[in-house]
Image (cartoon, rainbow, N blue to C red):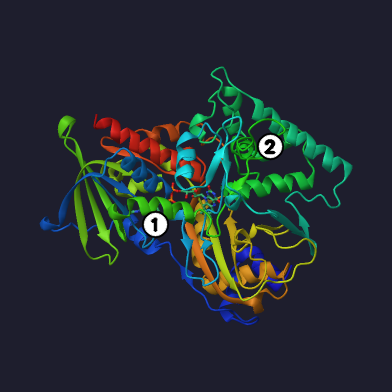
Amino acid sequence: MNRRELLAAFLGVPVALAACRSNVGPSFPDGSIVGASDGIGHKLRDGQRIEPSPDNWQRAGVVIVGGGIAGLTAAWRLMKAGFEDFVLLELEAAPGGTSRSGGDSPVVPYPWGAHYLPTPMKENGALVALLDEMGVIEGRDEKGEPMVAEQFLCRDPEERVFYKGRWYEGLYLHAGASHEDIVQLEAFNREVDKWAAWRDRRDRRAFAIPVAKSSDDAEVTSLDRITMGEWLRERGFNSPRLRWLVDYACRDDYGLTVEQTSAWAGLFYFASRMRAPGDEAQSLITWPEGNGRLVAHLYEKARARVRLGFAISEIIPTGEGKDAGVDVVALENDGRSAVGFHADRVIFAAPHFLTKYLIRPYREAAPPHVAEFQYGAWMVANLFLKDRPASVGFPLAWDNVLYESPSLGYVAATHQRGLDRGPTVFTYYYPLCDDDPRAARRRLLEANWKAWADVTLTDLTRAHREIRALTERLDVMRWGHAMIRPRPNFIWSGARRAATQPFRSIHFAHTDLSGIALFEEAFDHGIRAAEEVLATRG
Ligand SMILES: Cc1cc2nc3c(=O)[nH]c(=O)nc-3n(C[C@H](O)[C@H](O)[C@H](O)COP(=O)(O)OP(=O)(O)OC[C@H]3O[C@@H](n4cnc5c(N)ncnc54)[C@H](O)[C@@H]3O)c2cc1C
């Protein structure tokens, strides 16, 4: 490694921070920390409240809290039903939450979080309808499965992996694999096939997208009691390459290592994306700006009813029975003025842990399930490059993974545009997988821009020696509560089910209610919560 053992394996040790502070060593590009208003979040957590003045109260049928995928989807569903008496309030200056993207590069837009979704199967009718509306689907095959237009399918080559000085095609490291490695890979694929074929007595898949359509049969849910690492060991899977592949999948989708992830979630990653045993995984849909394209579409539909830069500070259920309602107070982003809404219903589409700060009765005594919702921290950096770095071995792909790094590597935004030369934007992803999520958040927030820029550039220098010289700007996003953590005994513990139930006139929608962070899950909860509200109106 080195540059002080890769900044003490990503700033775990104070020495690494000191090295960055002293700024001895390499030069740095321009850049800054962007987005994710943790300042206002901490004020809300610490109980900062402002009462709206009496003339600053309005009426709304429904207030949607949060303009991520779940909140925007709820708005989309309400509007599809012809219901427009709602307002959506979003804390940040831009919509999209963890699916947000950036548009200020003259070369290409780029993601700040979510960057793809697998092609949905025909059973996911609501999502197929959204993609139809966006013109992403161009027809159905003979089995009625949606067919995605070529330009939205991830372009080849999709993935490559860097190992000991060279890039190789694909994600599984075939080069140098032993006979035993291949035997184990095939045996693992047979296990996944078995689960892709499995159906319960009600003909439900073991692992379906959305999770709400998965079987709750004990044969499947018992997998949630052990880690994916234990599951691999129980079956004698000890091939380092296979273990790496599964660990990478867990870090990539859940921000957890193979030893921290529930075996249910680990197998969900592989089996839910496969239509039938032996099939390829569903093809990936992507755009240069990642799922920012989906955000833009949903936002455009609801724009007139969305208010950006409004942080909900309090939600107060009022009245009973036919007089039931809910008051909502929001701080404007200057943090000094407040506006209030008397609403019939609220759709709470922010992360569930916030309920204990924002819903008044929860603040006084939060139900026990709230404490079960734990979130991992991620650092994402966007590097604006004046030219491509050279590659030894396989050429640049969409997803470029470093085998020997705790990071996930990077995605190239220009790939989907078919631009294979000249300037580009690389989006670099690093999940902080500490056992204690608070320790991870501390590590994330204590390191400044220069420290994270140094981590990113030093890590990428392993594969691209000239990366520092080519990087003109490097911006950093610190996601403190990036993803719900599907650790053992969470997904099927009952906490999720309890959290999904409405509380008085408040309905809940967020990807965390599935126990995993995915576009499809946020979308599904947005639809469900909107339909719950519509059902109350007869
Ligand atoms: C780095 C990263 C990469 C990812 N990659 C993928 C991917 O490739 N594919 C995929 O499917 N998923 C990915 N995800 C998961 C992603 O979280 C989901 O796809 C989805 O965007 C979650 O949407 P959501 O609406 O449930 O939650 P969020 O994105 O958390 O949205 C919640 C919204 O509520 C707002 N809010 C919070 N508090 C308040 C308040 N007090 N007042 C008003 N508003 C408030 C927030 O600002 C936010 O906009 C990724 C996530 C991260 C962090």
Q: How many marks?
A: 2
Circle on res. 230? 2
**109 vs 200: above or below:** below
Q: Nearer the viewer, residue 48 or 172?
A: 172
User: What is the secondary structure assignment of the residue under circle 2?
Assistant: helix
Mark 2 or mark 1: which comes first in sequence? 1
Q: Nearer the viewer, mark 2 or mark 1?
A: 1
Q: Pick the residue in front: 217 or 109.
A: 109
Q: Which three-letter amino acid code belongs to the residue tagged 1? A: Pro
Q: Position of residue 486 (x, y in %)?
A: 54, 41
Residue 15 appears in the rendering:
no
Say whether residue 237 is left or right of residue 143.
right
Q: Which mark is residue 95?
A: 1
Q: Secondary structure at mark 1?
A: loop
Q: In the image shown, does 471 or 459 lie closer to the viewer?
A: 471
**What amino acid does circle 2 point to?**
Glu
Q: Is mark 1 within 8 Å of ligand 1?
A: yes
Q: Residue at x 69, y 28 (%)?
A: 194
Dot 2: within a 10 Å radius of its alpha carbon, few (fewer than 14), some, or many (20 or more) residues?
Answer: some
Mark-to-mark CA distance, 2 and 1:
40 Å
Task: Residue 392: give x, y in percent of width and height.
Answer: 79, 66
Quadrant in the picture for residue 487: top right
